[in-house]
């Protein structure tokens, strides 16, 4: 079982399920040729997909186009169902930054066939997590910036206030669809600027100066032989 670590603390929480939000920034939806959604687009990742800052992303052999997507992460700290705004706020126990790694060529093929995105989103090492900052220690204002660089070159940078559906509204909506429990993580969507990464690339991501992560892309064959 994998655990979330809180920054500047000895506190750990076991990771439960991972709920992801697609197309939560209008410009990102447009850059991929998607319609801007009226409701949040929801999909899941397994906990087995998780790695942490400092660990390596393995590029699967069955894909030739893997994209980075930097996202604000919300950690759920209590069990809620059909939560209102106040209950949703109270259920959020922390914030982090993460990477939703996506096999874009596989996803495009699946979308054309009307199939789920599972294969493109749930492979091992597709969910990279930072440490988390406790919601008791920091309250989001909306002015925080997500940013991501590859080999030192900035690719993504956007304020989280540009989300179509802000964090509390996402918690409310998702809790109307399924029970949220302690240890659930919500990936809140990525801003524009997603792009391809290849073996040897170094990816760095951060939420202002609050939390950050660093990882490297490696090939599946190299990982197996090492």
Image (cartoon, grey):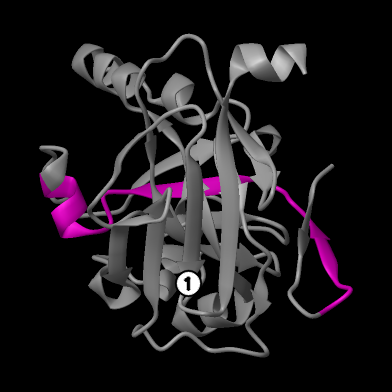
- At 51% from the left and 85% from the top, the residue drawn is 86
- At 43% from the left and 58% from the top, the residue drawn is 71
How crowded pointer 1 is (Cα within 10 Å; few <14, some 14-19, many 20+) is rated as many
Picture quadrant where residue 197 is located: top left
Depth order, front residue of 50/77:
50
Q: Where does label 1 land, which residue? A: 207
Residue 179 visible to an observer of this rendering: no
Secondary structure under the numbered disc 1 in the rendered image: strand
Where the C terminus falls, by quadrant? top right
Where the N terminus falls, by quadrant? top right
Residue 30 lies, with reference to residue 122, above or below; the image says below
> x, y (%) of residue 213?
59, 59
Left-right relation of 142 to 57: left
Residue 94 lies, with reference to residue 114, above or below; the image says below
Depth order, front residue of 126/183:
126
How many numbered marks does the figure carry?
A: 1
Tell me if residue 14 is in the magenta stretch: yes
Left-right relation of 68 to 34: right
Tell me if residue 75 is in the magenta stretch: no
> x, y (%) of residue 95?
58, 71
Residue found farthest to the right: 10
Picture quadrant where residue 184 is located: bottom right
> x, y (%) of residue 119?
47, 20
Residue 42 visible to an observer of this rendering: yes
Left-right relation of 154 to 35: right
Left-right relation of 103 to 226: left
Tell me the magenta residue range.
9-30
Depth order, front residue of 105/198:
198
- At 37% from the left and 75% from the top, the residue drawn is 145
> x, y (%) of residue 61?
51, 11
- At 16% from the left and 57% from the top, the residue drawn is 26
């Amino acid at each position: 079982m994998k655990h979330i670590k809180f920054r500047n603390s000895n506190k750990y929480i076991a990771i439960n399920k991972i709920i992801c939000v697609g197309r939560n920034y209008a410009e990102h939806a447009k850059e991929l040729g998607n319609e801007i959604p009226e409701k949040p687009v929801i999909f899941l990742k397994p906990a087995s997909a998780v790695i942490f800052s400092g660990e390596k992303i393995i590029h699967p052999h069955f894909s030739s186009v893997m994209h980075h997507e930097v996202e604000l992460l919300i950690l759920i700290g209590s069990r809620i169902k059909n939560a209102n705004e106040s209950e949703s706020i109270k259920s959020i126990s922390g914030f982090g930054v993460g990477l939703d790694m996506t096999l874009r060529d596989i996803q495009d093929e699946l979308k054309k066939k009307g199939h789920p995105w599972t294969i493109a989103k749930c492979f091992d090492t597709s969910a990279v997590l930072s440490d988390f900052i406790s919601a008791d220690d920091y309250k989001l204002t909306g002015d925080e910036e997500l940013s991501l660089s590859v080999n030192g070159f900035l690719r993504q940078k956007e304020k989280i206030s540009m989300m179509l559906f802000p964090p509390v509204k996402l918690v409310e909506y998702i809790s109307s669809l399924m029970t949220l429990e302690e240890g659930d993580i919500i990936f809140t969507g990525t801003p524009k600027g997603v792009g391809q990464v290849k073996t040897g690339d170094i990816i760095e991501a951060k939420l202002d100066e609050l939390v950050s992560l660093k990882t490297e892309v490696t090939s599946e064959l190299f990982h197996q032989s090492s």
